[in-house]
Amino acid sequence: MRTQVLSAIAAAVLLLSACGETDSDDSAPSAPPSVSAEDAKSTSLSDITVAGEFGQKPTVSFASPLVVDGSESTIISEGDGAKIAAGEQVTAQMTLVSGTTGEVVESSYDAQAPAGFPMDSAQISQDLYDALIDVPVGSRVLMSLNGAAQQGQPEQTLVYVIDVEKTTKPLTRAEGAKADQSGNPVTVTWADNGEPAISAPQGEPPAELESYTTIEGEGPEVKEGQSVAVHYSGWLWDDTSKYFDSSWQEGRGPFAVDPVGQAQVIDGWNEGLVGQKVGSQVVLVIPPDKGYGEQGSPPNIPGNATLIFVVDILSAQG
């Protein structure tokens, strides 16, 4: 079980997603590194040596400090698998090295669990997307960009070695047998493309997190620590006439919850998705203490709001 997935990498500049925060500004330039180019001993990827075989933790060496202007990437060794395509889920071993010190900051090889992320530039950085799109599975990729290795730390050039282990194409909607909804406080209906709508809820809002299965998938159960791709729509218990957020909106794709159980999403998601089967659709009724609490999430979610989410579980990796 993966208890921490590249926390430094995820917190830095590669993974952009958080529930309700899917917009990203790809035009914004990277912050300049704290070490100036004049003081650098290395200035490009060609100054970096990566030793070791694919599938093993790499040894990365260069004369530090390293300062690379902007983002660069190159394929160190090319695999013989299918090319990575947009919309796929990528499973990769990732090693992050500080350009300032030359030391390894974090490696998924040490955690003995790969990272998982979607090939979706709304959820990962454009730099990572560009570095991996059309790269064959089995490749080792070297990438640099400027950012903070961990939140609150100074900017620097960061070096990533990415071993692409596999890709999967997630489902586009929940698939399985439709379940009895008689015990569900809302009734879910579906558009032709699978987008859900719900009725007004019956009864009083619950004090505890509740989940109801509307479509029973046949995939494996979601485990804590995995990267989970979902489609979702969310409504206020007090107003189900329109959703306050939905990944089904035009131009958006599946949303990555990574790592589920500890992801930067509300507690109701981290708790409610674990144990569900891939392919399933679940209704999560989330009380305020598992949602946005007393402060809410203005302007769409008031304080002390009970939330209703309908979530399609499309894939789980890691």
Image: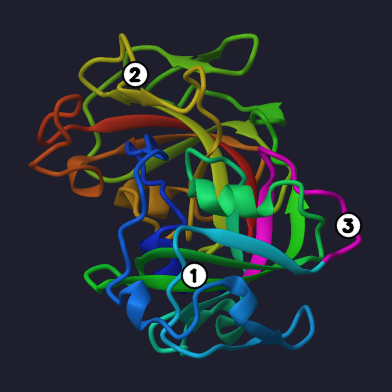
Seen from the viewer's position, the closer of residues 141 and 235 is 141
Lower sequence index among marks 1 and 2: 1
Q: Which mark is residue 5?
A: 1
Q: Position of residue 292 (x, y in %)?
A: 19, 42
Q: Mark 2 to mark 3: distance in Å?
A: 41 Å
Q: Main secondary structure of the magenta part?
A: loop
Of badges 1 and 2, the one in the foreground is: 1
Above or below — where is 30 with respect to 247? below
Identify the residue position indicated by label 3 in the image: 81
Q: Amino acid at mark 2?
A: Tyr
Compared across the picture, whether 112 is left or right of 153 comes to: right
Q: Mark 3 to mark 1: distance in Å?
A: 25 Å
Instruction: Reply yes or no: does residue 27 show up in magenta.
Output: no
Instruction: Reply yes or no: does residue 91 show up in magenta.
Output: yes
Mark 2 residue element: loop
Which residues, given as a range, are shown in magenta?
78-94
Picture quadrant of residue 61: bottom right
Residue at the right extreme of this rendering: 80
Q: Amino acid at mark 3?
A: Gly
